[in-house]
Amino acid sequence: MKNYFQFAERNTTFKRESIAGITTFLSMAYILVVNPVILSQTGMDKGAVFTATALSAIIGSLLIGLIANYPIGIAPSMGINAFFTFTVCMGMNIPWETALAGVFIAGVLFMILSLLKIREKIINIIPQDLKHAIAGGIGFFVAFIGLKNAGIVTGNEATFVAIGNLKAAPTILAIVGFIITIILLNRGVKGGIFYGMVISTIIGVFFEIIETPKAIVGKIPSLEPTFGVVFSHLDDIFSPKILAVIFTFLFVAFFDTAGALIAVASQAGLMKNNEIPNAGKALLADSMSTIAGAILGTSTTASFVESSAGIAVGGRTGFTSLVISGCFIISLFFSPLLSIVTPEVTAPALIIVGALMATEISRINWSNFYIVIPSFVTIIMMPLTYSVATGIALGFILYPISMIAMNKTKEVHPIMYVLCLTFIGYFVYVV
């Protein structure tokens, strides 16, 4: 096992990888609660979606761990599930069965692009400065999610965002957890982020901020309402409206995963010569999990940026992903217990991990204006648009334009020009 996952080469241990896997699982376990709530608004059975969510996370995390040896958790994407429900099904009046068929087709196209190594090629030709900007931008995005989940930052009609109610018990719990985690990390405690979440959970239950679960073990809901419905609705996808939806699934999932992969590889120190080892295998695992998820009954899966929480406590190999997969298997039986892992508990981990990832921006060449603008826009637009893919797309548009203005056209890979025009078309005709 140590040889297969290259423990010695990546300077890690079973204990460190296990703690990393549990930490990442706790950071992304909310998807088991939130995804069924969102998708059920389309008419899908909530219990079936819960099981499909867990199984797709099990399959995806297992595949990326075994095939690509990456410490990444895969599960249904939060951004795409909202698009699936509120834009595709409710906004465009497309039945959820047809929308799932669209997810399935997008997954098949993902797999073809991965097998042809087109996705890997695109990721590897991204300029070094933009890769640092993507990683740093995701750090700000992750921290913003943490601040929102903690209730420290909230919405405001006049100013869009504002300071939240710092006297609210859940917010106080998040702040206390944040301070505890900072102390543990400053004291050099290995796994400080994980232990911080555990301590916060205990405090929350003790002071009745977190509701004590009424049961520990629960029955696994049946998959029957959603399993395999895509195969009876494949004929429904041949319309301009559905094809546009499939393209959007492709675009968002492609660059959400690309961004997460770049950020994780950079944070874990796995990137070499501006290239990500085994990127093709990681992308193949991601596409296969999307296909499996669509068949089971959930929206597009993606690599979770919350995986950075596990990497921050030492996760470096695919064994971390195996632990994540194992935790999701256990969660199928202990679903009532998951209620104690609230957003306020995981918020401190996301804020701290975001801060660690944001240090990537120090590696950007800030002395050249033609690098500054694309990098800055990439970084700032991720949290402001609540989308990794949108930040990447805008950076990809501005980078070639800046290079053309500086008469540096030969320094830009031809694929970057193609992507620039593609993203312009996307914003004009699709968004």
Image: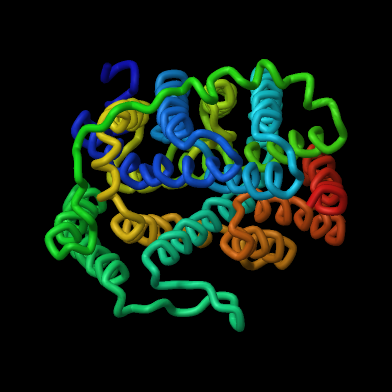
* Residue depicted at 43% across the width and 43% down the height: 31
Image: 110 above or below 168: above
Q: Position of residue 293 (x, y in %)?
A: 53, 26
Q: Is residue 30 visible?
A: yes
Answer with left or right where residue 219 lies relative to residue 107: left
Q: Residue furthest bottom?
A: 158
Answer with left or right where residue 425 lies relative to residue 200: right
Q: Position of residue 370 (x, y in %)?
A: 74, 63
| Residue nearer the viewer, 244 or 395 | 244
| Residue nearer the viewer, 144 or 106 | 106
Q: Is residue 113 visible?
A: no
Q: Position of residue 333 (x, y in %)?
A: 27, 29
Q: Tell how many labels.
A: 0
Answer with left or right where residue 103 lies relative to residue 4: right
Q: Quarter of the image for the N terminus: give it.
A: top left
Name the image quarter holding residue 211: bottom left
Image: 420 above or below 287: below
* Residue depicted at 62% across the width and 44% down the height: 85
Answer with left or right where residue 287 lies relative to residue 95: left
Q: Residue furthest left?
A: 206
